[in-house]
Image (cartoon, rainbow, N blue to C red):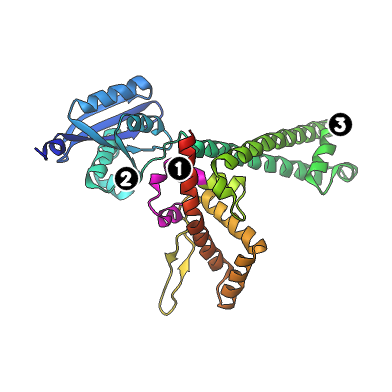
Amino acid sequence: MDDQPIQNEVILGIDTHLDTHVGVIIDYRGKWLGTLSIATNPAGYNELLSWAQSFGQLRRAGIEGTGTYGAGIARFLHTHGVEVWEINRPDRSQRRFQGKSDPTDAESAARTVLSGKAQAIPKLQQGAAEAMRTLSVARRSAVKARTQAINQLRALLISAPDDIRARLWKSKPEQCVKACAQILSLGDTVALQTLATTLRLLAKRWLSLTTELRELDATLESLTKQAAKRLRGQFGVGPQTAATLLAVAGDNPERLRSEAALAALCGANPLPASSGKTIRHRLNRNGDRTANNALWTIALVRMRSEPRTRAYVARRTAEGKSTKEIQRCLKRYIVRELYPLILADLKEAAFMT
């Protein structure tokens, strides 16, 4: 009788796309049972769940792309009591032998869950961490676009006639943009009229993006003060870095089983780089690069201003460590310090929502 629930269990694998998802059901022995293609809407999700449960007890599902195309179906299955696992895309060597099709990928996802190789828990994407991620995405694009606008404006001024360049070129971006935004005319020729229009439009674009950034920063400031109180209280942690670290952790803190898991997620875990008589570790260039950059920012601020970190840097420098090695160590120590605070903030934020 104890084995009955296991024998009745079926496992669902899903290959996700923008308009359709393909699901494959296998039993507890790995036998293929069926394939179904659904539309990516609530009716399709209900159809897939009912179809899968018609084969047996559905307790586990593996989904490709839970952070993108599979976010909706992952949330749906989670709310219906199904344990969802995030599946990485099959490696190329495996695809060369098995081929590539949506049912094949879905079946591979189901078999990955059955074998126990699936270890990643998908983000819930429905709390404060997801709100911070959304704001951070918009802020990064606004910063990039504003930088591009001022670079283009300055490039045009460099090649402009001497009298125009002398009148409009300013060392500070704000002053340069203000001067260009007030341009009415630079001359009667087609080239000068076009230059005036282009400079004015680029200046207005920069000003518009600056206003957008102020609004995003104000929202991030308010949100992190509410949902990241402990994190914001640490030296060198500002609204942007706090939002980035909470966003990469996700709204369900059970994803992070240890501080080492968070360090690996942020690409801050040390990797062996020893050879011969040299024993050392190197920077990890994998993981979430925005989170790694947030740790680098915190480490840089502390290296410049925090007495404890400055003393550590001086001691490690005297031992012969390079700046990159010191920064790698600092980022790992920062993860160890911030890990329990991130968990506490996420749990409190989940309770509030």
User: Which x, y percent locates residue 87?
Assistant: 33, 42
Q: Between marks 1 and 3, how big is the CA–CA gap?
A: 64 Å
Question: Quarter of the image containing the N terminus?
Answer: top left
Q: What is the count of numbered marks? A: 3
Q: Residue at x 28, y 31 (%)?
A: 23
Side of 34 where 306 appears, left or right: right
**Residue reaching furthest to the left:** 1
Side of 62 where 220 appears, left or right: right
Residue 164 in sight here: yes
Residue 342 position (above or below residue 122): below
User: Which residue position is annotated with label 3?
Assistant: 189
Q: Are marks 3 and 2 in contact (CB under 8 Å)?
A: no
Mark 1 or mark 2, whichever is nearer to me: 1
Callout 1: SS: helix
Side of 192 where 309 appears, left or right: left
State the image quarter where residue 216 is shown.
top right
**Residue reaching furthest to the bottom:** 277
Callout 2: SS: loop
Callout 3: SS: loop
User: Which x, y percent locates residue 115?
Assistant: 22, 47
Q: Earlier in the sequence, mark 3 or mark 2?
A: 2
Residue 34 position (above or below residue 271): above
Q: Residue at x 62, y 49 (%)?
A: 238
The magenta segment: 246-265
- The question of residue 261 being in magenta is answered with yes
Badge 2: residue crowd in 10 Å (few <14, some 14–19, many ≥20): some
User: Which residue position is annotated with label 2?
Assistant: 90
Observer-nearest of 83 and 199? 83
User: Which residue position is annotated with label 1?
Assistant: 347
Q: Amino acid at mark 3?
A: Thr
Residue 76 position (above or below residue 237): above
Q: Earlier in the sequence, mark 1 or mark 3?
A: 3
